[in-house]
Image (spheres, rainbow, N blue to C red):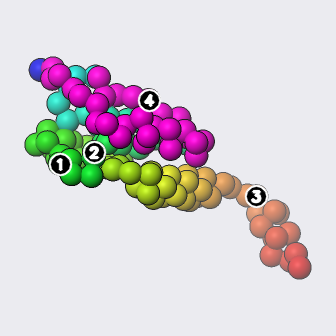
Amino acid sequence: MTYVRRQDANQPEIIAAFERLGFSVLDLSKIGVEGVPDLAVSVHKLTVFVEVKTKEGKLSPGQIRWHRESKAWTETARNTADVERIAKAMKQAALDSHAATVRISPCQAQQQAHSP
């Protein structure tokens, strides 16, 4: 079933804030599927779905269901402070993920252990 979606008044500001911080943003707000978040925000091959809400805005039942049941990382952004919080968490997660996948040879590990 499709739904008529409206864009929250602060969405352009939220998108611009993510883009200023170097993130790619895909606007999903017109997709018309109940509960689907407004934005897909990506950096360093990591994507987070972001629901944009105004200061007083509340999640709809479909959005609550998406947040609860989705296996994806989903956040809500109401202002640029939320953007900065989400961006910081995403960059840290990307760094942690990269560090976990970096492999060094036994020779490199031995050299590092004996380096000053």
* Residues at circles 3 and 4 in contact by the CB criterion of under 8 Å: no
**Is residue 3 inside the magenta stretch?**
yes
Judging depth in this view, the residue of 113 and 58 nearest the camera is 58
Q: Residue furthest front?
A: 9
Given the image, on which type of amino acid does mark 1 rest?
A: Lys
Q: Secondary structure at mark 4?
A: strand
Q: Which mark is residue 26?
A: 4
* CB contact under 8 Å: marks 1 and 2: yes
Location of residue 115 by image quarter: bottom right
Total labels: the figure holds 4
Tags 4 and 1 touching, CB below 8 Å = no
Cα gap from disc 3 to disc 2, whole angstroms: 48 Å
Viewer can see residue 35: yes
Q: Amino acid at mark 4?
A: Leu
**Where is residue 113 drawn, in percent x and y?**
80, 75
Q: Position of residue 87 (x, y in %)?
A: 50, 52
Q: Which sits earlier in the primary sequence, circle 4 or circle 1? A: 4
Which three-letter amino acid code belongs to the residue tagged 2?
Lys
In the image, which is nearer the foreground, mark 3 or mark 2?
2
The residue labelled by disc 1 is 58
Badge 1: how crowded within 10 Å, few (<14), some, or many (20+)? few
Q: Which residue is mark 2?
A: 53
Q: Confirm whether residue 44 shows in the render.
A: no
* Vertical arrangement, residue 2 with respect to residue 36, above or below: above
N-terminal label among 3 and 4: 4
Which residue position holds label 3?
105
| Separation of residues labelled 1 and 2 (CA atoms) | 7 Å
